[in-house]
Amino acid sequence: MRFRELAERYEELERTTKRLEMRATIARAVREAPRADLAKLLYLSQGLLRPEYEGVELGVADSLARRAIAIAAGVSPEEVGRRAQASGDLGRTAEELLRDRPKPLDPGELSIDEVYDGFLGIARTHGPGSTDAKVDRLASLLARATPLEARYLIRFALGTLRVGVREMTILDALSEAFGAGDPAAREQIEDAFNLTSDIGLVAEVLAERGLSGLRELRLTVGRPVRPMLAERARSLEEILTRMGGRAAFEFKYDGLRVQAHLAADGSVRLFSRRLEEIGPQFPELAPALVASVRQRPSIIEGECIPVDPETGEMRPFQEVSRRRGRKHEVTRLAEEVPVVLVVFDVLLAGGESLLAEPMPKRRAALESLVRPAERVQLAVHRPVASPEEAAAFFDEAVAAGAEGIMAKSLAPESVYRPGARGFWWIKYKREYVANLDDSIDGVVVGGFYGRGRRAGRFGSYLLAAYNPTADRFESFTRVGSGFDDRMLERLAERLRPWEVDERPPGVDTGLAPDRWIRPQLVLEVKGAELTLSPVHRAAEGRFRPGAGLALRFPRFTGRLRDDKGPTDATTSDELAEMYARQARTLSKSTAAPPPPDEGPEAPSSASERGPRAPKGV
Ligand code: AMP
């Protein structure tokens, strides 16, 4: 398949924000692509070269791209820089410059294969002289590209493809192309993706063997499974009722979720909740796991938590986050901030998949597989059959420094469900008891310029919840307090590559921020209460026609949820559940119920001064 055809699809995608149209466009590309190109096409369309968990990075900076464009267009890199400054988009600049180029070589003949291999070559170029080699490779792709192709080649190289193709939309498109849009087929395809975390692989199997081929996909060491997720409940009593009067309770540890893959040869890979490889940040865990896990190959899951080097007691989550992302100093930090992996589930034991086994069997398998030691421990786990036992366990968990409890169903259906959130696991946290202010993880989708001291840069951000049914990011608040100057600066820098001129596809809000930001970064916020708002769109229409949910008096907690991807943010359904719970709690207490409609939220100037929650909330 020619890359030209794919570039035309990208152009169509760029023009729409409607999910149905996007799905149809991708489905068309999927149908048209020869089998050999299918996986490559899907990776490229997501801005990737390999499934995300492999972490393949291109390593192309703006300056490198400018040099490549200069060579292909026959102008100076400075000229490219000048033009790019005017357009604000190097992809457009490349397009324009190539349009004026004197004599293109066979334009429009580039194949997807050549583009893919070209980029893979760039990703694999390392070491001294690699920048020049990368420039050459990129320039030789551009030399053969049409202007439109150049726009997308450059954006891909810089990680700013912006066509808005997310996994859920691709899964929809695959089910349209291979399952005639049948909901059962859609589910089967999503299951296969949740198991393998590799859309390219799923598409290839579909193309080769059809839907029935998906059943042959297996759990494999080195290929992470999308983690099973928990629902929340209002009270311990509710948990017991939902679980049929009995459940297993575990401590809910506050750290980083880790999926540990131990291969037969003794090599170990650790994946985060977002399926990023994080083994190198915790070098002490691999040997500890090899010593503690009795059989291989195996896959186990746990929470990586910081502990006090003196006492072995749990420490606050923030300390473990200090160990993320640092390439240097790993050894020093390993001593300063030691961690323990507290394991709570097993997916594969000695090569045998346990995904289809109910939780009690998996727990028993975990206990015989893992020999607890200093760095690898078993999550505290106890059967609970009455509200009194539940309350006692909860108090014990909180006293030990845990965030709360995680209840796990004992039913025969309590199998491991990759990627699914359900009532087989229910979390119940400390905050729920203290007051209403459970924290919310919101995705940044826009920025508002500040005033006064914050003039000239972002002073507040528009946050959205994720709606998985519609694959949409629905705004729920504008947050300007809880940031210090350094944090604002750091955030602005982190968000800059994702700033765009127009509302990104899938973002739904009634507000118009000064700059739109593609949904990438997740921030943790707390607020006073949830109210109905005409401008926010989370769970819109659920409680009143035309009104969405808004968080009043939001405050950033200081915690960047780098461990969460945009679709791991708090969902609109979760917000709706919190709103319903809050209304019930308030109607039971003496406090007045939340005002039905307080307008959008606190005005920005007030929120930048950092309003306090009203008394008694
Ligand atoms: P949350 O991030 O608030 O949605 O809570 C779910 C997370 O709690 C999981 O993804 C795990 O990282 C973490 N967790 C802590 N302790 C446990 C446990 N005993 N069982 C399962 N998950 C746990």
Image: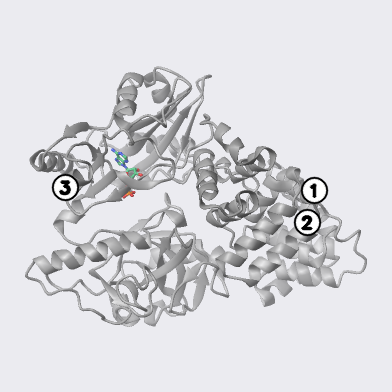
Mark 3 or mark 1, earlier in chain: 1
Identify residue type, mark 3: Leu
Q: Are marks 3 and 2 in contact (CB under 8 Å)?
A: no
- Residue at image x 87%, y 61%? 107
Q: Which element carries disc 1, helix, strand or loop?
A: helix
Identify residue type, mark 2: Phe
Left or right? Give the position of 282 relative to 554: right
Q: Which element carries disc 2, helix, strand or loop?
A: helix
- Residue at image x 29%, y 75%? 532
Camera-side mark, 3 or 2: 3
Q: Are marks 1 and 2 in contact (CB under 8 Å)?
A: yes
**Residue 89 location (% of width, % of height):** 66, 70
Q: Which element carries disc 3, helix, strand or loop?
A: helix
**Residue 615 location (% of width, % of height):** 13, 72
In the picture, the disc for residue 114 is: 1
Does residue 305 sit above or below 463 in this rendering? above
**Residue 15 location (% of width, % of height):** 65, 72
The residues bearing labels 3 and 2 have C-alpha atoms spaced at a distance of: 56 Å
Mark 1 or mark 2, earlier in chain: 2
Rendered-image quarter of ligand 1: top left
Front residue (pair 48, 182): 182
Other residues around mark 3 within 10 Å, as few (<14) / some (14–19) / many (≥20): many
In the picture, the disc for residue 3 is: 2
Identify residue type, mark 1: Glu
The residues bearing labels 1 and 2 have C-alpha atoms spaced at a distance of: 9 Å
The residues bearing labels 3 and 1 have C-alpha atoms spaced at a distance of: 58 Å
Ligand 1 is within 8 Å of the C-beta of the residue at disc 3: no
